[in-house]
Image (cartoon, grey):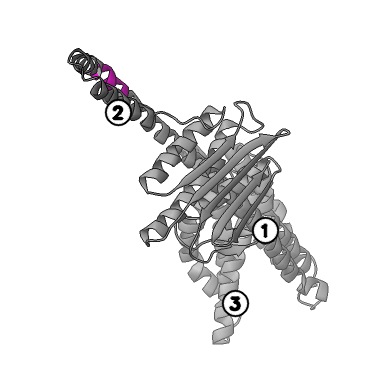
Amino acid sequence: MSGIYFSNSIAVAAFGMILSAAFCDILWTWRKWLVMAGSMAVILLFQGIIYFRVGVDVVEYTYPIVTHFPLIIVLCVLSKKRLWPTISVLTAYLCCQTRRWLALLIVAIFSGGAAMQSIAELVMTLPLLLILLRIVAPSVRSISRHTFTAQWQFGLVPALYYGFDYLTSVYTNLLLDGALVAVEFMPFVCSVAYLVFIVYYSEEGRIRSQLEQMQAVLNLQITQAVREIEALRESWQKTRTYRHDLRHHMQYISSCIENGRIEQAQGYIREICSEIEMNEVIVYCENEAANLIFSAFAGRAKDCGIPITIRAGIAQSISISESDLCVLLSNALENALRACRKMKEKGLSATIEVDAYQRNGKFFLQAINSCEEDITFEHGLPVTNKPGHGIGVRSICAVVERYNGIYSFSVKDDKFILRVSL
């Protein structure tokens, strides 16, 4: 029995030290491997001396001083870090309890004794170690590269369990005696850790949502920039064409005048002027960016056969940035155009009305478009389960919230109404 117990003690010590080293983010070299192997051998030697000279109880009492503290120092030297080696050792100690509990489960199933427990622990040491090294260790090491706050949050539960185990099972018998404070402590820790995890997960979700909105805004800005570039490129190509054809136009007009066909020449001039005006950016207001966006969407609406009315009074210099103005106008018009396009495909009439102006230092936007299907609202926002939809609404809300403004979405008389004030 003593031989099995001693072998199991050596196995659990090696198990914990190997895991502690694996959990540390160390760039291993042959020299560091030798230092680690030598340190483990020295620690095991001291344990053996205490075991045979003094007794098992003393080994348990002095384990933190003889094993854990020297191991932390060695890992601090090898990793050149202060906090994380301690967390690695505490986490490895927590993993040792997995090995012990599985052995206790086997003993409970087969009604065995202390010898069966030691044998079970010995048998599962290597397989469990390999599983932890392959699956768990890389994830634990990655946390060592996080912030100091994240590191101590990760190490809080292993540290509490370490102190709890030694205070209630090694240095006292509170847990074995059934003291309620000791018995209920770890369930308390689990419940608190769970609640903290919920709060942390919720905060991470909020941050992730903000990043997704920011990414959506950036994608929209890129899309709008590409459209504007394409519009400018098309305008440039047409300008080159008109410049190239100008000589032919002049020759034709001159020929008409020389032959007395004045009305034909005038008609030809009017036709050319109409073609040029069709490709001009319509001036709705003083703001150039707003004119580009309004013109682009007005052209798309005209191509779809959707009547659109735009009334704008936006100065060149306004209280919001040009990129945010682009996000607001583009998303509002994109959503309106998409809804009207669906109605046109079903043979229904659809219109868009947009009012955008600045007054007393505040920016106001109202977009009204026809809508057919019922729209579901949650917390005042239209929602949809269709993939790729809903990003525009979130982008509008993100911009308005950034300026502490007000937004509203509503439906009245088959009209979807968006109002923004900031």
| Residue 376 visible in image | yes
Front in this rendered view, residue 141 or 74: 141
Q: Earlier in the sequence, mark 1 or mark 3?
A: 3
Q: How many neighbours does mark 1 have within 10 angstroms: few (below 14), some (14-19), or many (20 or more)?
A: many
| Residue 28 visible in image | no
Q: Earlier in the sequence, mark 2 or mark 3?
A: 3
Cβ atoms at labels 2 and 3 below 8 Å apart: no
Q: Vertical placement of 68 versus 106: above or below?
A: above
Magenta segment, which residues? 239-245
Q: Which residue is mark 1?
A: 158
Q: Earlier in the sequence, mark 2 or mark 1?
A: 1
Percent x, y for residue 161?
A: 71, 62
Q: Which residue is mark 3?
A: 104
- Is residue 218 rendered to the left or right of residue 176? left
State the separation of the CA atoms marked 2 and 1: 82 Å
Q: Vertical placement of 223 versus 277: above or below?
A: below
Front in this rendered view, residue 255 or 76: 255
Q: Which residue is mark 2?
A: 271
Percent x, y for residue 43?
A: 61, 51
* Image quadrant in which the N terminus is located: bottom right
- Is residue 115 rendered to the left or right of residue 182? left
Q: Given this view, does label 2 or label 1 mark the residue nearer the observer?
A: 2
* Image quadrant in which the C terminus is located: top right
Task: Name the outermost residue toward the bottom.
Answer: 111
